[in-house]
C-alpha cells in the first residue's frame, strides 16, 4: 500500500511521501499515540510528523524503532525546533534532545516550528511556553541566525533535510536571499477554508515542498468544519467512492503538496491514506465551497501569541497592540504614568515621535520598567519632516536616542513623505508656518532620506528596523523600486470609517506591516466617533464580551495589522489590550457600519497647509 502514496521530490532529491500521520498530542496518551503510529505503518504510511513541543517524540520513536516489518530507513520522520530554542547555540542542543526522545540516530526532516523566538528557559517541557502577564514575550533573535545554525546541522549527518513551518512569503523571500541551503519544506495550515493559494504557489515555484497541517481543519478539536459537512462535498466524494474526509485530503494532494492528518482512531487512519486522482473541475468546486466558509484554525504566523504579534520582514517580533503617545493636551507626567500603566498591563510596544515631545517621558518609563535592555518594550520613534536632509538624519536620530535615554532604538520611521525647511532641532523650530498659514516643502526626495536611514542600519547598528508613516501606494512603489532595505512598517490612519483597504492589502502583499494610528477615531480630540456609538457595534461587542472600543481594536487586529490606541486613562489602557479574533461576518459588519460614516481625521492639508496635501483632499473641504 505504501507504493500507492504519491511521492514529492524535495529540492535535495530526497523522497517525501504526500500523505503522513500528524501526531500533535491533543488529549491522546503516549500509549494511544504509539499504537496509532504502529497502525499507520501497518497501513502503508511512510511519513510521520512530530515536534518537540508536541511531547510525542518518545511515542513516535518507539513505534518506528520497534515495528516488526517496516525498516527505519523507509520512514520519513520529521520533527521541529521550538521557539524558545532559536538562539544559535541552542539549536544543536535541541536536536540532540529530539534524537534522544526519538531514540533515533538521525531525523529525516528538522524544521523551524515558528519564525518568532521566545526567551530560553531550558529544555524541560514545562519551560517551553512560559507566560508573563498573559503573554509569551518574544525576544530579538533573527530567524536568519537560527537558520544558519540549522544549516550547520547537515554537516553532522544527524539531519537529512532542513525546513521551516508557518513562514509567510516575505519571510521566505528574505530567507532565500540570505541562506546557503534553501529550505526544503514549509509546513503550513492548508484546507479548503484556508487554501493559502498564493503561499502554496510561491513555495512550489521556489522548489519548497508544502506540507499541510490541519488539512481537515481539525474538527475533533476546533468543532465541525462546514466544508466537511456540506452536502456538495458528500456528492463529490460519492463520485470517487470516498468519504468527505478522504476527498478533502485528496484535494490537497491534487494541488501538489503533502497532507498530515492527525488521528488515533484506527478506521480513520486506514481511510486517510486512500488516494485517487481528482478532476480539476472537482478540485475547483471544493475550493469554491471552502471560499464560502473562510476559517483559520491555528494563529496566523504574522500575528501569533496570546497578545498577537507580527513578524517584521527582517525577522523582528512586533506586538500588534501598542500604546500611542501623541501628546495632545497631556502633560509629560501624565504620559510617563500612562506608559508605566501600559507596561504593567502587558503592553510591549510603545509608539512615540520626536515631534510629539513625548520621547523623554516614554524613555524614562520604559527604562524604569525593564530589568535589562533585552527585556525592554519595543519602542518606535519617528523622523520629523524638517530633518529629511540626509545630513540631518543621523543628527535627528542622535537627538531621539538622547531624549529616550537609550543606546539603541528598535524601530525608526520616516514620519511623513514630504520635507520641510530645516531650522534646527529645538521643538519650536520643527513646525514653522509662513504668513499664509502654509508650511512650504523643500526639495529633498524621500528616497534620499530613506538611503540615509538605511545607513543607520548598515553602519551605525543602533537601529535594527526602519519604516515609514503616511506613505501611499505610489510612494511605496517608488521606494521599493529604489531601496536596498525595504520598509518593515507603514504607520497610517486606519479605523472603520477610514478602512484604507487597498493600502492595507498592498502593504500586506509586499510584506510591510501596517500600524494603525487613530484606530478608535480619537474621539477625545476629534469628537465622538459614530461607529463607536452605533447600537449595532454594541450588539456585536456584547457577543464577544467586549466594549465597543475593544471590538474596534479587535477589528483591526483581525484584519492583520497592529493598532496603537492613545490614552492616559488607566482603565482604558487596561481595557484596550484585550482583543478577540472576530469572524469574517463580524469584520464585514463593522466595515459596513464605518462605510456609512466615512471620515479622515489626520489631514496634512488642514494641519500643514496646501503644500502638504498628499492625500488629494478637496481644497474647499
Image (cartoon, rainbow, N blue to C red):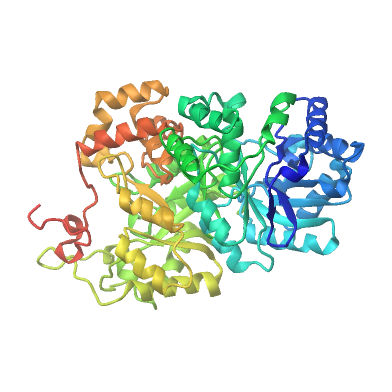
**In this rendering, position of residue 192 left or right of residue 434:** right
Instruction: Tell me, yes or no, if residue 416 can be seen here.
Output: no
User: Depth check: 78 or 10 in front?
Assistant: 10
Q: Residue at x 31, y 58 (%)?
A: 470
**In this rendering, position of residue 142 left or right of residue 620:** right
Give residue 451's position: percent from left, percent from top: 43, 74
- Residue 617: image quadrant is bottom left
Give residue 124's position: percent from left, percent from top: 79, 38
344 up-or-down from 229: above or below: below
Give residue 522's position: percent from left, percent from top: 28, 41
**In this rendering, position of residue 208 left or right of residue 610:** right
Q: Which residue lies most toward the left here?
A: 620
199 up-or-down from 347: above or below: below
**In this rendering, position of residue 339 left or right of residue 69:** left
164 up-or-down from 398: above or below: above
- Residue 159: image quadrant is bottom right
Amino acid at each position: 500500500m505504501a507504493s500507492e502514496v504519491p511521492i514529492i521530490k524535495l529540492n535535495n532529491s530526497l523522497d517525501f511521501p504526500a500523505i503522513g500521520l500528524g501526531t500533535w498530542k491533543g488529549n491522546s496518551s503516549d500509549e494511544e499515540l504509539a499504537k496509532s503510529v504502529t497502525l499507520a505503518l501497518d497501513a502503508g504510511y511512510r511519513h510521520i510528523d512530530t515536534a518537540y513541543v508536541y511531547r510525542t517524540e518518545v511515542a513516535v520513536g518507539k513505534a518506528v524503532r520497534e515495528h516488526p516489518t517496516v525498516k527505519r530507513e523507509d520512514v520519513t520522520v520529521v520533527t521541529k525546533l521550538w521557539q524558545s530554542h532559536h538562539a544559535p547555540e541552542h539549536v544543536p542542543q535541541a536536536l540532540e534532545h529530539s534524537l534522544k526522545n526519538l531514540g533515533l540516530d538521525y531525523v529525516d526532516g528538522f524544521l523551524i516550528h515558528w519564525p518568532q523566538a521566545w526567551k530560553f528557559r531550558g529544555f524541560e517541557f514545562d519551560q517551553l511556553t512560559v507566560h508573563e502577564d498573559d503573554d509569551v514575550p518574544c525576544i530579538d533573535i533573527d530567524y536568519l541566525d537560527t537558520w544558519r545554525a540549522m544549516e550547520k546541522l547537515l554537516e553532522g549527518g544527524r539531519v537529512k533535510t532542513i525546513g521551516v513551518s508557518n513562514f509567510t512569503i516575505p519571510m521566505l523571500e528574505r530567507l532565500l536571499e540570505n541562506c546557503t541551503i534553501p529550505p526544503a519544506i514549509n509546513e503550513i495550515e492548508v484546507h479548503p477554508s484556508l487554501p493559502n493559494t498564493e503561499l502554496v504557489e510561491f513555495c512550489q515555484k521556489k522548489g519548497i515542498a508544502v506540507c499541510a497541517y490541519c488539512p481537515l481543519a481539525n474538527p475533533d478539536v476546533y468543532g465541525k468544519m462546514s466544508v466537511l459537512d456540506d452536502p456538495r462535498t458528500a456528492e463529490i466524494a460519492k463520485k470517487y467512492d470516498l468519504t468527505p474526509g478522504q476527498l478533502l485530503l485528496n484535494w490537497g494532494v491534487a494541488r501538489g503538496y503533502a497532507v498530515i492528518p492527525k488521528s488515533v482512531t484506527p478506521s480513520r487512519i486506514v481511510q486517510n491514506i486512500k488516494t485517487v486522482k481528482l478532476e480539476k473541475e472537482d478540485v475547483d468546486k471544493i475550493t469554491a465551497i471552502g471560499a464560502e466558509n473562510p476559517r483559520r484554525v491555528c494563529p496566523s504566523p504574522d500575528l501569533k501569541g496570546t497578545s498577537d504579534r507580527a513578524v517584521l520582514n527582517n525577522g523582528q517580533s512586533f506586538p500588534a497592540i501598542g500604546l500611542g503617545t501623541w501628546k495632545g493636551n497631556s502633560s509629560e507626567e501624565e504620559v510617563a504614568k500612562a506608559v508605566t500603566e501600559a507596561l504593567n498591563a502587558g503592553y510591549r510596544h510603545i509608539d512615540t515621535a520626536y515631534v510629539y515631545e513625548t520621547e523623554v517621558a516614554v524613555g524614562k518609563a520604559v527604562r524604569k520598567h525593564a530589568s535589562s535592555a533585552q527585556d525592554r518594550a519595543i519602542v518606535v520613534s519617528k523622523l520629523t519632516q524638517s530633518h529629511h536632509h540626509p545630513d540631518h538624519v543621523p543628527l535627528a536620530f542622535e537627538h531621539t536616542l538622547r531624549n529616550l535615554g537609550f543606546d539603541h532604538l528598535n524601530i525608526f520611521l520616516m514620519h511623513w513623505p514630504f520635507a520641510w525647511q530645516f531650522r534646527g532641532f529645538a521643538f519650536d523650530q520643527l513646525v514653522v508656518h509662513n504668513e499664509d498659514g502654509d508650511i512650504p516643502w523643500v526639495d529633498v526626495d524621500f528616497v534620499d532620506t530613506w538611503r540615509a536611514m538605511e545607513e543607520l542600519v548598515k553602519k551605525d547598528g543602533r537601529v535594527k528596523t526602519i519604516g515609514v508613516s503616511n506613505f501611499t501606494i505610489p510612494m511605496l512603489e517608488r521606494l521599493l523600486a529604489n531601496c536596498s532595505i525595504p520598509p518593515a512598517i507603514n504607520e497610517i490612519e486606519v479605523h472603520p470609517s477610514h478602512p484604507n483597504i487597498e493600502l492595507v492589502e498592498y502593504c500586506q502583499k509586499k510584506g510591510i506591516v501596517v500600524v494603525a494610528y487613530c484606530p478608535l477615531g480619537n474621539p477625545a480630540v476629534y469628537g465622538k466617533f459614530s461607529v463607536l456609538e452605533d447600537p449595532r457595534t454594541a450588539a456585536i461587542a456584547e457577543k464577544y464580551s467586549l466594549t465597543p472600543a475593544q471590538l474596534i481594536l479587535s477589528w483591526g487586529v483581525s484584519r492583520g495589522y497592529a493598532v496603537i490606541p492613545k490614552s492616559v486613562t488607566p482603565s482604558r489602557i487596561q481595557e484596550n489590550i484585550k482583543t478577540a479574533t472576530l469572524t469574517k461576518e463580524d469584520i464585514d459588519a463593522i466595515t459596513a457600519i464605518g462605510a456609512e460614516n466615512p471620515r479622515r481625521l489626520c489631514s496634512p492639508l488642514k494641519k500643514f497647509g496646501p503644500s502638504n496635501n498628499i492625500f488629494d483632499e478637496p481644497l474647499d473641504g
